[in-house]
């Protein structure tokens, strides 16, 4: 199964596409890479005031696509902690007001499906509307959802995306679990710190996907996921998937990984890189967006930008030089060393 990506939109911590290697990347603040929010001209001000951050991200990234007059048959969103900040505000109100005089705003905005439902209401879309909440595989499961729908309804088009925010509550939990770095870190030595944990990130990435090749940016060749913390099992799984999906003449131009500066999960990325024995260029992306459960959606957006510009910026490179041409990109990422995904994308000619 496969589909085409026809259009993209993104809200992330970086202001520019960053194809100019002289451009200065935005640094983290207190160990957090906050997203740069636009002015949200497309969202009515009365509704914008009531939106939590995750909802603003998702709606703000998706509306520019939905308002172009495209016929969309459904909305599929992946998130791990979307709406968590508003959820905690509502729970605090229950205690503070002794379950009396509660305002409904935080309750409505504090559920994971708030983004998909708001998009359905604002765009008057009565089609398929679902939110996948599966931690580090929330976006990948949304992709699989879209693939199955397109297999069943080959003429349809779907809005596919993912969104997650940095919430104070979730950040503290992840910090206590060692998933974020304890020391204040701006991200200047993102991959070389040699310590456990990463930098917190956030953002929203949205895509129009369909079986229509005309004017498409990229084609998803395959997506595979696995739950495991066994390094050898992951290595064998990746080798097996590549053997199943790649024909002999296929050539991967770039391996893009979700390496995140956490020394506890570095072994998985090192193992995957060893498969190619330094024979292909290897790049990383999480210095741009930080670590969050659905950061793979940002990686897919970045891959589409690489295809559109036919150029790979030097600042994302880890091994080798930027490839002269970029037609196939393999994306490998994992979340906390437990949830792994593998996707192959090709440029549409």
Image (spheres, helix red, strand yellow):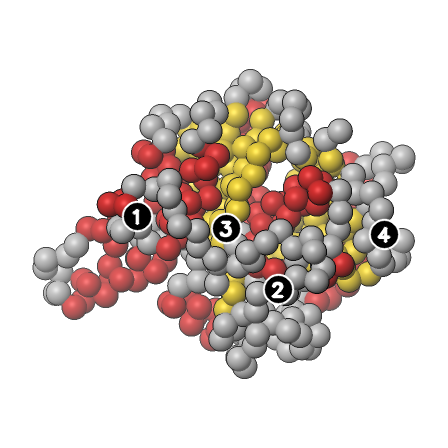
Q: Position of residue 53 (x, y in %)?
A: 37, 55
Q: Position of residue 162 (x, y in %)?
A: 50, 46
- The residue tagged 1 is 48
Whichever of labels 4 and 2 marks the residue nearer the N terminus, that label is 2
Q: Disc 1 vs disc 2: Cβ atoms closer than 8 Å?
A: no
Q: Is residue 225 visible?
A: no
The image position of residue 65, as x and y in percent, is 48, 34
Q: State the quadrant of the N terminus.
A: top right
**Residue underneath mark 3:** 11
Q: Are marks 3 and 4 in contact (CB under 8 Å)?
A: no
Q: Which residue is mark 4?
A: 280
Query: What label does residue 326 carry, if any?
Result: none
State left or right for residue 138 relative to residue 225. Answer: left
Q: CA distance from mark 1 to mark 2?
A: 29 Å
According to the image, label 2 marks what residue?
Answer: 25
Q: Residues within 10 Å of mark 4 (few under 14, many from 20)?
A: some
What is the C-alpha distance between the residues marked 1 and 4?
45 Å
Left/right of residue 117 with respect to residue 141 in the rendered view: left
The residue at 69%/53% (across/down) is 19
């Amino acid at each position: 199964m496969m589909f085409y990506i026809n259009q993209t939109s993104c809200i992330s911590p970086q202001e520019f596409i960053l194809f100019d290697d002289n451009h200065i990347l935005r640094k983290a603040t207190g160990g957090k890479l906050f997203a740069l929010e636009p002015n949200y001209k497309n969202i009515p001000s009365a509704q914008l005031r009531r939106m939590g951050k995750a909802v603003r991200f998702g709606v703000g990234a998706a509306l520019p696509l939905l308002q172009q007059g495209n016929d969309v048959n459904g909305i599929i969103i992946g998130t791990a902690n979307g709406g968590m900040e508003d959820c905690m505000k509502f729970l605090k109100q229950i205690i503070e007001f002794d379950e009396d005089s509660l305002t409904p705003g935080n309750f409505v905005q504090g559920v994971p499906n708030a983004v998909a439902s708001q998009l359905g209401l604002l765009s008057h879309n009565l089609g398929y509307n679902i939110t996948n909440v599966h931690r580090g595989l929330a976006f990948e499961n949304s992709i699989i959802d879209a693939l199955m729908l397109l297999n069943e309804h080959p003429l349809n088009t779907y809005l596919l995306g993912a969104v997650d925010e940095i919430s104070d509550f979730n950040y503290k939990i992840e910090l206590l679990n060692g998933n974020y770095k304890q020391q204040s870190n701006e991200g200047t030595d993102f991959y070389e710190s040699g310590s456990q944990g990463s930098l917190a990130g956030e953002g929203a990435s949205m895509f129009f996907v369909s079986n229509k090749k005309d004017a498409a940016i990229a084609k998803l060749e395959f997506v595979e996921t696995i739950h495991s913390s066994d390094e050898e099992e992951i290595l064998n799984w990746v080798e097996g998937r590549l053997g199943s999906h790649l024909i002999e003449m296929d050539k991967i131009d770039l391996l893009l990984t979700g390496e995140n500066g956490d020394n506890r999960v570095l072994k998985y990325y090192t193992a995957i890189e060893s498969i190619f024995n330094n024979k292909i260029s290897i790049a990383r992306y999480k210095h741009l967006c930080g670590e969050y459960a659905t950061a793979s959606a940002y990686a897919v957006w970045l891959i589409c930008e690489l295809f559109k510009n036919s150029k790979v910026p030097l600042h994302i490179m880890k091994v080798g030089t930027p490839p002269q041409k970029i037609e196939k990109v393999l994306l490998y990422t994992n979340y906390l060393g437990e949830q792994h995904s593998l996707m192959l994308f090709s440029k549409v000619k």
